[in-house]
Image (spheres, rainbow, N blue to C red):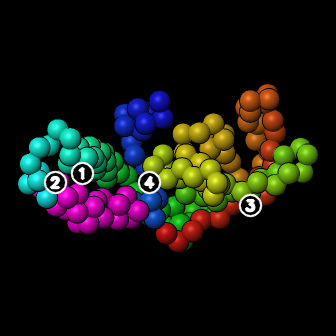
């Protein structure tokens, strides 16, 4: 479901995320795909393809790689690179939360959490990277340091206090 939403909306992405997608695409095109094409070609030259594991697996892997290449091309074509650290450098409010912000907040129990608001292709919950379309990010966007924001959690509504906001240069 998340991918469908991502495919149908603007693909906001940080400069780091954009570079990561380009790097993955180039790796698939320059290294991975040629290697698999070579294996498939070699396996095909061995005769009977119906029981040739290298050939069957290679063709399957080639389809997976081609599908990923098409996906990455589409995501990069529709990417809108957003670097709010530049906005801050040119007089924007550094305490206000926008796309790309790293936000530290605490809940009513005093638990502190740090998240970074990123594009849907960059989500990594282990690192605290949440999508700009996630409920927490939507609640935080345009809030400022010192604000109390109400968010909806699986266990019900919760209030969080924004402690700090920062923007990385990239």
Mark 2 or 3 closer to N-term?
2
Q: Nearer the viewer, mark 2 or mark 3?
A: 2
Residue displayed at 72% across by 57% down: 114
- Marks 2/4 in contact by CB < 8 Å: the verdict is no
In whole angstroms, how far apart are the C-alphas of marks 1 and 4? 38 Å
Could you tell me if residue 62 is visible in this image? no
SS type, badge 3: strand
Q: Earlier in the sequence, mark 1 or mark 4?
A: 4
Q: CA distance from mark 3 to mark 4?
A: 22 Å
User: How far apart are labels 2 and 4 at the CA level?
Assistant: 40 Å
Q: Residue at x 41, y 62 (%)?
A: 20
Label 3 neighbour load within 10 Å: few <14, some 14-19, many 20+: some
Q: Is 22 colored magenta in this rendering?
A: yes
Question: Which residue in the structure is indicated by mark 1?
Answer: 54
> Vertical placement of 155 versus 68: above or below?
above
Residue 50 position, x and y percent, is: 17, 38
Circle 4 residue: 13
Q: Nearer the viewer, mark 3 or mark 4?
A: 4
User: Of residues 83 and 66, which is closer to you in this image?
Assistant: 66
What residue does disc 3 label? 164
Mark toward the viewer: 3 or 1: 1
Image coordinates for residue 25, horizontal then vertical, percent: 30, 59
SS under mark 2:
helix
**Label 1 secondary element:** helix
Closer mark to the observer between disc 1 and disc 4: 1
For disc 2, the neighbor class at 10 Å (few under 14, some 14 to 19, many from 20) is some
Q: Which residue is mark 2?
A: 43
**Mark 2 or mark 4, which is nearer to you?**
2
The residue most toward the right is 109
Q: Are marks 2 and 3 in contact (CB under 8 Å)?
A: no
Magenta region: 19-41
């Amino acid at each position: 479901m998340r991918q469908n939403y991502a495919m149908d909306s603007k693909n906001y992405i940080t400069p780091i995320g954009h570079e990561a997608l380009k790097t993955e695409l180039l790796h698939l095109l320059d290294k991975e795909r040629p290697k698999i094409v070579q294996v498939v070609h070699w396996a095909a030259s061995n005769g009977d393809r119906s029981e040739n594991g290298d050939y069957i697996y290679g063709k399957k892997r080639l389809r997976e790689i081609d599908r990923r290449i098409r996906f990455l091309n589409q995501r990069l074509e529709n990417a809108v690179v957003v670097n709010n650290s530049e906005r801050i450098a040119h007089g924007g409010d550094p305490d206000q939360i926008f796309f790309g912000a790293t936000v530290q907040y605490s809940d009513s129990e005093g638990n502190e959490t740090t998240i970074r608001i990123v594009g849907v292709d960059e989500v990594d919950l282990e690192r605290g990277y949440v999508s700009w379309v996630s409920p927490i990010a939507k609640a935080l966007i345009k809030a400022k340091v010192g604000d109390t924001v109400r968010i909806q959690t699986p266990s019900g509504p919760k209030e969080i206090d924004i402690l700090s906001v920062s923007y990385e240069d990239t």
